[in-house]
Amino acid sequence: MTTEQRFPDGFLWGTATAAHQVEGGNWNSDWWAWEHKPDTLCAEPSGDACDHWNRYPDDLALLSGLGFNAYRFSVEWARIEPEEGCFSTVALDHYRRVCATAREQGLHPVVTFHHFTSPRWVDADGSWENPKTAERFARYCERAAGALGDLVGTACTINEPNIVAFYGYRHGVFPPGRTDSAARHAANDTFIDGHRRAVEAIKAGAGGVPVGLTLSMTAWEAVEGGEENLVKFRRPFEDVFLEAARGDDFIGVQTYTRERIGPDGQLPPEAGVETTLMGYEFWPQALEATIRRAWEVTDGTPVIVTENGIAAEDDARRVAYVTGALQGVQRCIDDGLDVRGYFYWTALDNFEWLFGYRPTFGLVGVDRQTFERTPKPSASWLGSVARANALVV
Ligand code: BGC
């Protein structure tokens, strides 16, 4: 039996990318420095990434041709403000052209102002552990939003502050490599302050665009008496951010899998279950669970799925994963939850942080020598879902 499930009119269908992962040559950022340090766990440096800095016109034409109506990307603080107070007109003009090109291609531009990377000068002064970073970030946002102005469609302040605080300040595997629980909590606080200030700054700079935070969320499950632990883990990881996002124009939900918590902490996926190239359990049901939780904890703040996807060699598993995830989105909408869009992570096979280029999340493959783009079958499949604004199962 075939069923067709339609999405609300005006639903945003897009893909998401991040500057450092696709542009190439982001040498003035803390991540570039980190990738080139001998004692980190980085698999390889980002190098030229996908050369999206130069190839964005073709990339946007490709995404539009596939059927998408939106594109989420980030503007790079390290390029826009390479030294404190020194702003690059060339970088701002570049991002104006990216927004303008997206609009010409019929893609609603969703602009993220911070996606994991900070300028080296911010890193040298305590990065997000230093409360001053919140003010500095807001100043940069106001300047960038002013320059991009009415070309911005929707704005995301900070991408997954919870991941940066956890991996960069508690576990030391992301820059700045801190391994201290107090540092993690300090980073959480600065991120929350930075988000609140950025909301005002972006609205001041770019007029009435919708502004929100995007958060990494997991379908948490307690196993064998792990309930107390689950609450303890989830609080600094999700709840403090969801509470800070209450009343925003939207909350960006970003979900990949579920997380099982036992009495002694996080548990790996059960033996024998299907896992992805990231080692995550194949669990598309996670999206529905996290949308519902975001909606509940933010007291009904509208949701945009700003990231959801899978790193897989077998592209058919990508289609299966997204189908399962979108069915969950549908159930949320049917229950009256205000879900406004779905952005697949990610458009291009790109630089996956610590893991380098091995995990392939992209709808489009990229030749590492020639940068040639090759759309996978999942790209035309999801593009046709977007064009029809309906999922046919
Ligand atoms: C991040 C992306 C990342 C993706 C897949 C999210 O945590 O926003 O930058 O590539 O997940 O791991």
Image (cartoon, rainbow, N blue to C red):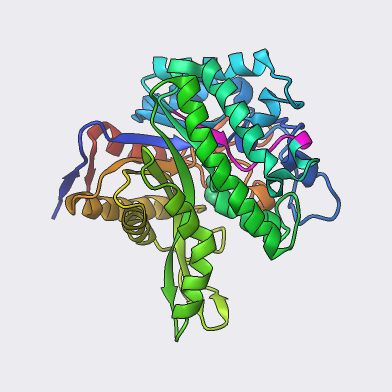
Residue 263 on image: x %, y % = 52, 83
Residue 375 on image: x %, y % = 47, 35
Q: Nearer the viewer, residue 243 or 321?
A: 243
Q: Residue at x 37, y 58 (%)?
A: 290
Residue 81 painted magenta:
no
Above-or-below relation of 376 to 166 = above
Q: Residue at x 59, y 32 (%)?
A: 138
Task: Confirm whether residue 354 shows in the render.
Answer: yes
Task: Confirm whether residue 270 shows in the render.
Answer: no
Above-or-below relation of 358 to 376 = below
Q: Which residues are magenta?
A: 110-121
Q: Quadrant of residue 277?
A: bottom right
Q: Nearer the viewer, residue 314 or 177?
A: 177
Residue 276 on image: x %, y % = 51, 60
Q: Quadrant of residue 151?
A: top left
Outermost residue to the right = 38
Q: Residue at x 55, y 74 (%)?
A: 266
Left or right: 285 as drawn, with respect to 17: left
Q: Residue at x 46, y 49 (%)?
A: 244
Residue 90 on image: x %, y % = 66, 14
Left or right: 357 as drawn, with respect to 360: right
Q: How many marks?
A: 0
Which quadrant is the N terminus positioned in?
bottom left
Q: Nearer the viewer, residue 280 or 223?
A: 223
